[in-house]
Image (cartoon, rainbow, N blue to C red):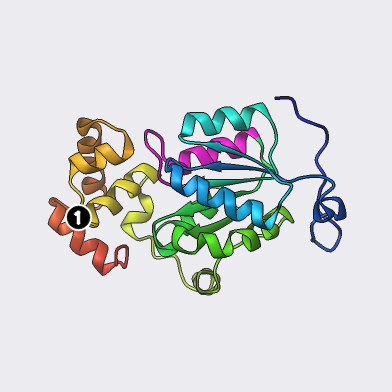
């Protein structure tokens, strides 16, 4: 599909352009999530909020990147956990394809686990899935206007971290995929369950497990769970 023309930026006051708000230029929104029911629910919420919007869906990373490469979008809703390729990897590639397109990350994980990584990778906002249906329209309006959407609690945490010395916790050195697998292991999932969830082989997940344990200077999953609890990485 060809791009329909130049995109309209935000107004001087940071609000959505009048054409966007009046509906003369329908919003183009891409939903990337591997769960069809979630995509359907988000579509309905968005159509209620933006009746003339044009919405496309992607069920995996490949579909999402293909749609991103074929046209420009006003915003992308991106699940952070998809089979085969992590949402954070997709986010980084999306920002390479269209640096100006705002990406709103969706996650089943609490924001204190993934939000900072997502924002650091280029996300314009972060929503947990249990609040997405209530807040997604508000969040989209903000990120499309050029802002960043985070919850008040996360905003306070980020501001607090700016005044603290960087302590360099061991898990901060993990790659995005290692962090994802660490979180799953700490939540009690087995290597086999993680391989199924992420669309990776058991051998690949085991390799990641070995690597992340070495980086954390741990030897067993039990030690990893205790570490995650101590650092507040699982609830």
Q: Which residues are magenta?
A: 80-97
> Residue 104, can we see it?
no
Residue 67 spot, x, y in % from top left: 60, 30
> Relative to 134, does residue 220 appear above or below in the rendering?
above
Quadrant in the picture for the N terminus: top right
| Residue at 19% across, 64% down | 226
| Residue 93 sits inside the magenta stretch | yes
User: Relative to 20, does residue 142 appear above or below in the rendering?
Assistant: below
In the rendered image, the quadrant that contains the C terminus is: bottom left
x and y percentages locating residue 192 in the rendered image: 18, 39
Query: Looking at this view, is 44 or 184 the one in front?
Result: 44
The residue drawn where x is 47% and y is 36% is 59
Residue 51 left/right relative to 97: right
Give the side of residue 134 with respect to residue 172, left or right: right
- Residue 190 in the magenta stretch? The answer is no
**121 or 29: nearer the eye?**
29
Quadrant for residue 134, please give it: bottom right
Secondary structure under badge 1?
Answer: loop
Q: Which residue is mark 1?
A: 188
The image shows residue 88, relative to residue 164, as above or below, that is: above
User: Which residue is at 55% across, 70% downward?
Assistant: 155
Q: Quadrant of residue 71?
A: top right
């Amino acid at each position: 599909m060809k791009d329909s023309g130049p995109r309209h930026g935000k107004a001087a006051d940071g609000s959505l352009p009048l054409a966007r708000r009046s509906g003369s230029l329908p919003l183009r929104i891409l939903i990337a999530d591997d769960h069809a029911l979630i995509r359907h629910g988000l579509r309905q919420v968005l159509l209620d909020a933006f009746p003339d919007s044009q919405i496309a869906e992607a069920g995996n990373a490949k579909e999402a990147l293909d749609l991103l490469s074929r046209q420009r979008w006003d915003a992308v809703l991106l699940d952070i956990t998809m089979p085969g390729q992590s949402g954070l990897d997709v986010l980084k590639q999306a920002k390479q394809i269209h640096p100006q397109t705002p990406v709103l990350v969706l996650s089943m994980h609490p924001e204190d686990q993934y939000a900072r990584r997502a924002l650091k990778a280029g996300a314009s906002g972060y929503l947990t899935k249990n609040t997405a249906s209530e807040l997604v329209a508000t969040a989209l309006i903000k990120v499309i206007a050029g802002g960043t959407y985070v919850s008040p609690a996360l905003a306070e945490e980020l501001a607090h971290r700016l005044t603290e010395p960087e302590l360099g916790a061991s898990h901060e050195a993990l790659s995005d995929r290692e962090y994802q697998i660490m979180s799953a292991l700490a939540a009690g999932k087995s290597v086999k369950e993680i391989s199924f969830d992420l669309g990776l082989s058991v051998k690949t997940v085991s390799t990641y497990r070995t690597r992340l344990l070495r980086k954390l200077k741990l030897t067993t999953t039990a030690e990893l769970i205790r570490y995650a609890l101590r650092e507040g990485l699982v609830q």
